[in-house]
Amino acid sequence: MHKPMWKRQPWLWFARAGCVGLVMCCLLLLFPTGALFPKEALAAPALGPQQEFPGGGDQCLRHGPFIGGNLVVASNQVLCSDLISFGGTVAINGTVNGNVVVFNGNVIIEGTVNGDVNLYGGMVTLQSGSHVHGDIHLYNARWARERNAQLDGALVDRSQRLVWPFTSPLSFSFPSLSLLIWVGLGLLLTWLLPEHLMLVRTTLQTSAGRSLLIGLLSSILAPALILLLSTLIITIPLAIIVAVGLVAGWALGTVALGLFIGERLLHTSAPQRHARFLQVTVGLFILTLASSLPIIGWLVSLGTGLLGLGAALLSRFGTRLYGLPRYPLML
């Protein structure tokens, strides 16, 4: 029978966990200070291997989100939709009739943007002759402007704001710290427990309704059980175990749900990019942003957590396969 890695090589498992934990602690310490994004290191980036939109001239182009790689809108091209990119560098030499949204990448504008520019990490450069008819919103990002570059709107810089995981339900703020924590935890679990994560993900896919029900019942009964066990000194360790198990199941299930969302999204928009780490990153990125939306964000967080917790419990924290998968498992 195939054993998980932590049973086959426990010393290697703990060594990896220690290294990743140390890196995460350093990131958490450096992130608020802005040391991860020094101004002097953010010069205008150079483009490497790149892809261009097909077509040109008077043709009005439309395209879905881009994931990874460098993207170029040529000088004779007009994009009649929002330009959304995850990672890489976006060079706009033509015209974009919509908003530009880039996550963890760089934007070089030499043409025209008839909309807003939203940059989450990275740098935007307005080169000479460029024209942005909207606003530029920076979230932990930087910008540079050359002479003869036009910006009709305002520059909204939120780079110095540190947003904690718990935000106001009536306002949206970019969840920088939440993203760092969840994506880091997702990459850590994907590296250390790939089999467990896949089994929880499969349970989510095959038994979503039952997972939500089990998660809801567990969240109602577990606090009462913890309170009951805490009344006696001898049962306090059991109360701690139940509490830790509840949090661990919540986290494992949330990461598994992010993996499932990332798989679906990348299969639709970028089937050639199927790396497990990229799937987890994209899925958790979307979940964290959705959880930060005003008014409905708390409902997304609650539903995600209950669904993930139920799937983790049904699969016994990813140690068994609950139900029959629709497709062969690829570990």
Image (cartoon, rainbow, N blue to C red):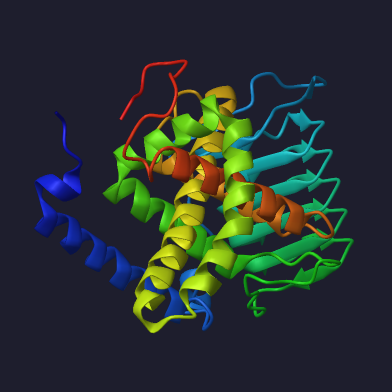
The answer to which of 273 and 166 lies nearer the viewer is 166
Picture quadrant where residue 210 is located: top right
Pick the quarter of the image with the C terminus. Answer: top left
Which residue is rendered at x = 37% and y = 17% of the image?
A: 328
Q: Is residue 48 left or right of residue 160?
A: left
Picture quadrant where residue 315 is located: top left
Which residue is rendered at x = 10% and y = 50% of the image?
A: 9
Which residue is rendered at x = 73% and y = 29% of the image?
A: 76
Residue 277 higher or lower than 266, as above or below = below
Which residue is rendered at x = 47% and y = 78% of the image?
A: 230
The answer to which of 169 and 131 lies nearer the viewer is 169
Q: Position of residue 170 (x, y in %)?
A: 86, 67
Residue 26 higher or lower than 287, as above or below = below
Q: Position of residue 253 (x, y in %)?
A: 49, 47
In the rendered image, is residue 137 in sight? Answer: yes
In the rendered image, is residue 87 in sight? Answer: no
The answer to which of 221 and 133 lies nearer the viewer is 221
Pick the quarter of the image with the N terminus. Answer: top left
Q: Position of residue 207 (x, y in %)?
A: 55, 28
Q: Position of residue 321 (x, y in %)?
A: 37, 29
Residue 265 higher or lower than 68, as above or below = above
Q: Is residue 22 left or right of residue 228?
A: left
| Number of dots carrying numbers | 0
